[in-house]
């Protein structure tokens, strides 16, 4: 099976679908480590069913799986922070092992993002009780294409009671206009490729200049899963894949809302 793309290099930040799945799986393992979601054992049969659903040619395959998830008492938190990352990891593994086509990985990842958007709609700062609470800007720089891990992190932030503004590929002029209209307590940047380091470095400097160095900037992403030393050269206040550690470093750790009860699917 050959999709015209290289499969041989694995485990690197820039390896397309592998990077998407690796980032989603590993970053969520870190950011949800202290949550109740990880206290519930993940069911292998449901993982396989969800994997089959997102790879299916049916138009709405997840709908047929919802009743089974309800019967198994799988919460939205567990689905977002355990099952979706594991299925993403297996999509990447399937690509590496030549059991998934590029189309299946791409469509499967898009469907996982759609499921995540659907189940995370109720996770807002207002529902967490923080109408005047912290507001965070989450950025994917221009040229960065891996969005699933960032979306999982955004859902996590909102579930913690943080108001989130997500921007993907936003240019300097648009950012300047955004800062005129809105104020932020922290900025989080996600990158996956080594090629994005210079872009990220320039972006951090631009953000610091725009805000008068008054807003802390945290950087994370698949590129830093192996503790790459280049992280120290970015000029950010912290480089981490732990969302709560980033919030602590940005001075927002004490403002986190109490976690809402885990709603069912």
Image (cartoon, rainbow, N blue to C red):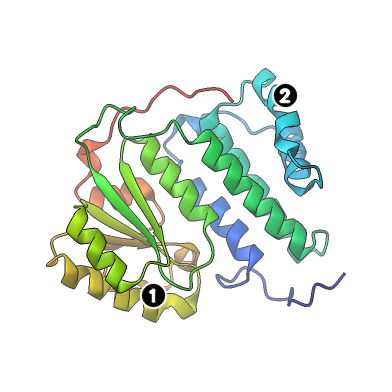
Establish if 193 lies above or below 255. Answer: below
Q: Earlier in the sequence, mark 2 or mark 1?
A: 2
| Left or right of 64 in this view: 177 | left
Does residue 38 appear in the picture of this structure? no
Q: Which mark's residue is nearer the viewer, 2 or 1?
A: 2
Residue 68 percent across, percent down from the top left: 72, 24
* Residue position marked by numbered label 2 in the rendering: 68
The quadrant of the picture occupied by the N terminus is: bottom right
* Residue position marked by numbered label 1 in the rendering: 229
Q: How far apart, in angstroms, are the residues tagged by discs 2 and 1?
A: 45 Å
Residue 213 percent across, percent down from the top left: 14, 66
Quadrant of the rendered image containing residue 82: top right
Residue 169 percent across, percent down from the top left: 42, 67
| Left or right of 216 in this view: 164 | right
Residue depicted at x 41% and y 33%: 123
Quadrant of the rendered image containing residue 189: bottom left
Residue depicted at x 28% and y 58%: 187
Establish if 147 lies above or below 29. Answer: below
Few, some or many residues within 10 Å of mark 2 (<14, 14–19, 20+): some
The quadrant of the picture occupied by the C terminus is: top right
């Amino acid at each position: 099976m050959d999709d015209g793309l290289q499969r041989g290099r694995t485990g690197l930040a820039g390896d397309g679908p592998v990077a998407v799945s690796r980032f989603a799986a590993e970053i969520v393992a870190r950011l949800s480590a202290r949550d109740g979601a990880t206290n519930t054992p993940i069911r292998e049969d449901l993982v396989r069913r969800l994997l089959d659903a997102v790879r299916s040619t049916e138009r709405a395959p997840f709908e047929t799986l919802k009743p089974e998830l309800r019967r198994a008492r799988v919460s939205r938190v567990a689905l977002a922070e355990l099952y979706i990352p594991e299925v993403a990891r297996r999509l990447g593994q399937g690509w590496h092992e030549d059991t998934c086509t590029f189309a299946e990985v791409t469509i499967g990842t898009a469907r996982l993002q759609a499921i995540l958007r659907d189940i995370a709609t109720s996770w807002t700062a207002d529902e967490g009780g923080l109408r005047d609470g912290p507001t965070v800007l989450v950025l994917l720089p221009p040229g960065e294409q891996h969005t699933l891990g960032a979306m999982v992190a955004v859902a996590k932030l909102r579930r913690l009671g943080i108001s989130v503004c997500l921007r993907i590929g936003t240019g300097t002029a648009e950012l300047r206009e955004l800062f005129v209209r809105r104020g932020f307590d922290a900025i989080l940047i996600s990158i996956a490729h080594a090629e994005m380091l210079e872009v990220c470095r320039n972006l951090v400097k631009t953000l610091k200049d725009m805000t008068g160095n008054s807003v802390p900037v945290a950087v994370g992403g698949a590129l830093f899963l192996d503790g790459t030393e280049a992280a120290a050269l970015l000029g950010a206040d912290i480089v981490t894949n732990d969302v709560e550690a980033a919030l602590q470093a940005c001075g927002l750790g004490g403002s986190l809302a109490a976690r809402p009860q885990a709603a069912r699917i």
